[in-house]
Image (spheres, rainbow, N blue to C red):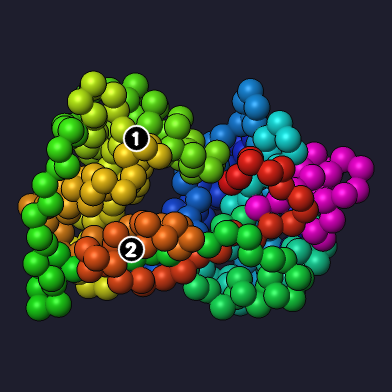
Amino acid sequence: MISYRWCEQLVDDDRAEVLELVRVAADYDHEAGFTAIPAADVEAVSRAGVVVRHLPIKARRDLSARDDAPMLVVAYLHLSIDDNGQGSVAYVVHPDCRSRGVTTTLVEELGIDVTQPGGWVGTGATALRAWAYGSHPASERLTGRFGIEAVRRLWTLSRNLTGPFAVDLAPASVPAGYAVNEASDMVAVTEIVGVAGLPTRQAAEVSDGIASGTGSVLIASDQGGQPVGFVWFDPELHEHLELRAAWVRALVLTPQSRGSGLGTALLTRALEELEAVGAQTSLIRIDPEDEGAVRMLRLLSYEQEDAHACFQVGAWKEGVES
């Protein structure tokens, strides 16, 4: 039914087909918030500290059994492996080929044994993690069938900024001893990320995302000018449940600044700016085990909208998280 071959770099027709697949899938899944693979991952190659492997999965058009039907890319798996052998997986199926057995067949053929010599199917990965964004019953059925456990959770929360269901946004003063300004460079962000205790992968995503120039960043500093927190938000509007929505991408504080009210002040400033550009609702993702963040967002009238899970196979080295 399917065919596949691991490669270090996608080229020619495979590259073009995979790029088109991830574009179509991202557009189709945008409203639901399901996992999307950025085009940069399709173009990625191995670099210092990271081994990259690509797996385009092909089948005959319309999953036909006819030998004369052309072979097309119907799914794509991206694998990045760190120096500890820990593999981060991203996977997507073309919308036209979902619920037709492609993924089940792939897992049955590849297996999930990461203990064999050479790691998982010879890639060198001795542990695997994959995020499933959105409450998709297919991912729940698949992981349940193969006994793959969820090891981390995230929630998407939303807050209406305008309209009949919006709650007025109360002003939030910056606590005494702190100042908030627009970020002028990446140095302050890097300092904060370095001491905030973020999981390794999340820290890299935040740093890389801000460095790319996406969105806006407000930095908080203490009386000595030391950066102690920031909020990263994206004023670009998109449609979400028929509303104009914008994301707060990250709110990060150093340990010593938490509990001071600084997080509320930073987030309120970001929400004011999003409302000013026409956003009707704000979205943010958080770790539900972060009780302080959950409490702060509840007080700011955020409500849970969706849940996401990180699934794991094998033993992940303690302190090195995806």
Amino acid on which disc 2 is placed: Arg
- Place residue 220 in its image quadrant: top left
Q: Is residue 213 above or below residue 101?
A: above
Q: Nearer the viewer, residue 233 or 70?
A: 233
Q: Is residue 235 above or below residue 159?
A: above
Q: Nearer the viewer, mark 2 or mark 1?
A: 2
Q: Is residue 158 visible?
A: no
Amino acid on which disc 1 is placed: Ile
What's the magenta bit mostly, secondary-structure-wise? loop
Say which element carries label 1. Answer: helix
Q: Nearer the viewer, residue 229 or 236?
A: 229
Q: Which residue is depicted at the point 72% across and 66% down?
A: 148
Q: Which residue is depicted at the point 71% across and 43% down?
A: 317
**Residue 246 picture location, percent across and down:** 24, 56
Q: Give the class, few, some or many, for how many residues have Cα within 10 Å of label 1's Cα (few <14, many ≥20).
A: many
Residue 135 left/right relative to 183: right
Please give the residue where the numbered disc 1 appears in the rendered image.
210
Q: Nearer the viewer, residue 125 or 292?
A: 292
Q: Is residue 115 above or below residue 213?
A: below
Please give the residue where the numbered disc 2 appears in the rendered image.
295
Residues marked 2 and 1 touching at CB (< 8 Å): no
Q: Which residue is depicted at the point 32% across and 39% down?
A: 257
**Residue 228 picture location, percent across and down:** 31, 33
Q: Is residue 204 visible?
A: yes
In the rendered image, residue 110 lying in the magenta stretch gets the answer no
- Place residue 126 in its image quadrant: top right
Task: Report the Cα–Cα distance between label 2 and label 1.
Answer: 26 Å
What is the span of residues highlighted in magenta in the rendered image?
Answer: 111-129
Say which element carries label 2. Answer: helix
